[in-house]
Amino acid sequence: MKIKELLVNVQVEKITGDENIEISGMVYDSRQAKQGDLFICIDGFRYDGHNFIPKAVQNGVCAVVIEREVDEYIQGITYIRVKSSREAMASLAASFYNYPLDKLQLIGVTGTNGKTTTTYLIKSILEQAGLKTGLIGTIKNIIADKTLPATRTTPESLDLYQLYDKMLKEGITHVVMEVSSHALDLKRVKGMEFAAAVFTNITQDHLDYHKSIEEYLKAKCSLFKQLTDQGTAIINIDDNYSNQVIESASARVISYGINKKADLSAEDIQLSPKGASFLIRGRKNIPLSINLTGEFNVYNTLAAVGVAVAFDIDDDSIKRGLEGIPGVAGRFELINESQGFSVVVDYAHTPDGMENVLKTALEFVKGKIIVVFGCGGDRDEGKRPLMGKMAASYGDYAVLTSDNPRSEDPLTILAAVEKGVLDYDSETPYIVLPDRREAIFHAITRACANDMVIIFGKGHETYQIFKDKTISFDDREVAREAIKEKMADDKK
Ligand SMILES: CC(=O)N[C@H]1[C@@H](OP(=O)(O)OP(=O)(O)OC[C@H]2O[C@@H](n3ccc(=O)[nH]c3=O)[C@H](O)[C@@H]2O)O[C@H](CO)[C@@H](O)[C@@H]1O[C@H](C)C(=O)N[C@@H](C)C(=O)N[C@H](CCC(=O)O)C(=O)O
Ligand SMILES: Nc1ncnc2c1ncn2[C@@H]1O[C@H](COP(=O)(O)OP(=O)(O)OP(=O)(O)O)[C@@H](O)[C@H]1O
Ligand SMILES: N[C@H](CCC[C@H](N)C(=O)O)C(=O)O
Ligand SMILES: [Mg+2]
């Protein structure tokens, strides 16, 4: 494709060099550049992509997109200067892949918690209705029967278009994706129009990035300005910020909730460790028995039903779709080795997520609740004491441990968490064990009949990120090992 043709929807400030040259691919990372590629320079948080132009040229790129003047203009290379490289990337990718979104129905899910779960529920309903649905999100990206690894919740615009293109080639008609606040702020979904957008909730997280809850909310709200004219906003009316989200919606709204009057609500909610049963009321009246527990999953279900209403899906498909899901990996996943106590691996990594799960556990756990958790390094520091407070207020015993310390010292993170435990309630017994394996073994060794050990924070993750290395680590595998060892010891 000629550069000139690619630039139709891009606001170009200046072109230096030949705009008639052909490009064969696009990249935003010099390390991935190949012969004939266009390299898009992004001025990032750690590096400035403009500094890697010589490296990209060495790797064969014939053109670059820049957003500032550079010291040296290499001969034979076409330079396209734009106002914003990230915005230009989204437009360039759309035209490079020949506008796949013209033929796909896009459904976006945003909110602090519940995005992954809700996307799986939506996919399941749409597929029961016979609609071929692709999925993009935290755990993995799914295209028909293929799965592709996910490195982030919402990929960069270029990677998104690559996925849409693949999906279209596989006959997919609907795409359900998580849209993180980072993605909205960093223009990863710039220019993409959504047929439906879901707002799950906003609670404390990511204030390292957004700096204030208002900025965080503003990023989330922007998704609802990207709805098509016939699109639908599906909004959790019980959330404190729902009004602001509704105000920003450029299309019709379907509300859902349990406490306030809503278009879709739930009644007669019964929870057990294995699932929940309830009646959907309002725009749909459907009795349901799902394999996901907790009131928060009733909310996620209502959100998915809202999308089904938007697409005019029949009740049978909705029921089969929701009841057919066995659970979502690492979300309240029960680890069962026939031990006499329960072990749960859950991805809660915010105070609100923890509170929801702990409140759910209190509904049916007869013994003690033992909580194993930590907080991510290089992430919102404000949530650390708050998560400590949740463990102290709902747990009977807390094991504070590492959860992806990244560039930080694990003990510094744990000191902030410990402060939350102590400030809330100095009576709750706890121990600090930075080694996560040791922490999980310790918790499981202490569990007695009818207790529940809840291991928070890493869910489906299969790694632990430290300053200098990333190691393989899977809470579910380690928990199984610990249970088996305890059962063998108990027999002795
Ligand atoms: C805050 C954030 O999102 N940062 C993302 C951002 O980083 P950055 O702008 O700082 O990029 P950078 O590393 O400084 O590099 C600048 C540019 O130089 C390029 N480069 C760099 C080195 C080199 O040798 N050659 C080269 O060309 C890079 O490819 C990039 O284009 O752009 C990078 C490239 O696209 C991303 O990898 C990086 O995500 C990092 C890994 C990250 O951790 N992001 C998290 C916070 C995130 O996005 N999370 C959300 C929400 C999670 C949730 O709650 O669900 C998500 O959607 O996953
Ligand atoms: N609707 C909800 N409200 C509050 N907490 C929830 C909700 N749904 C799930 N959770 C909790 O949050 C955890 C993460 O859920 P999920 O992966 O669906 O959220 P997410 O928004 O995709 O998270 P991420 O931001 O990491 O992508 C779950 O393990 C559970 O503890
Ligand atoms: N998407 C979230 C996931 C956090 C999961 C937790 N294990 C951590 O590493 O903090 C983030 O990147 O903030
Ligand atoms: Mg997610």
Image (spheres, rainbow, N blue to C red):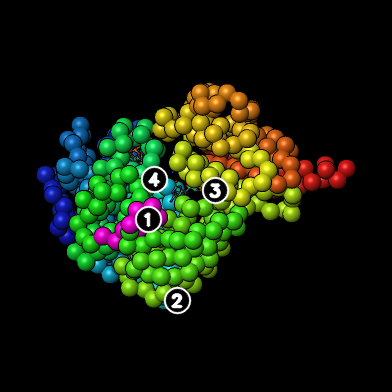
Q: Which residue sits at x=13%, y=48%?
A: 12
Q: CA distance from mark 4 to mark 3?
A: 19 Å
Q: Amino acid at mark 3?
A: Thr
The numbered mark at residue 112 is 4
Q: Secondary structure at mark 2?
A: helix
Is residue 273 at least partly visible in the picture? yes
Q: Secondary structure at mark 1?
A: loop
Q: Is residue 90 left or right of residue 371?
A: left
The numbered mark at residue 316 is 2
Residue 223: % across, % down: 27, 52
Mark 3 or mark 4, which is nearer the start of the sequence?
Answer: 4
Residue 101: % across, % down: 27, 64
**The magenta stretch spans which residues?**
253-261
Q: Amino acid at mark 1?
A: Gly
Contact? badges 2 and 1 (CB < 8 Å): no
Q: Which residue sits at x=50%, y=41%?
A: 354
The numbered mark at residue 257 is 1
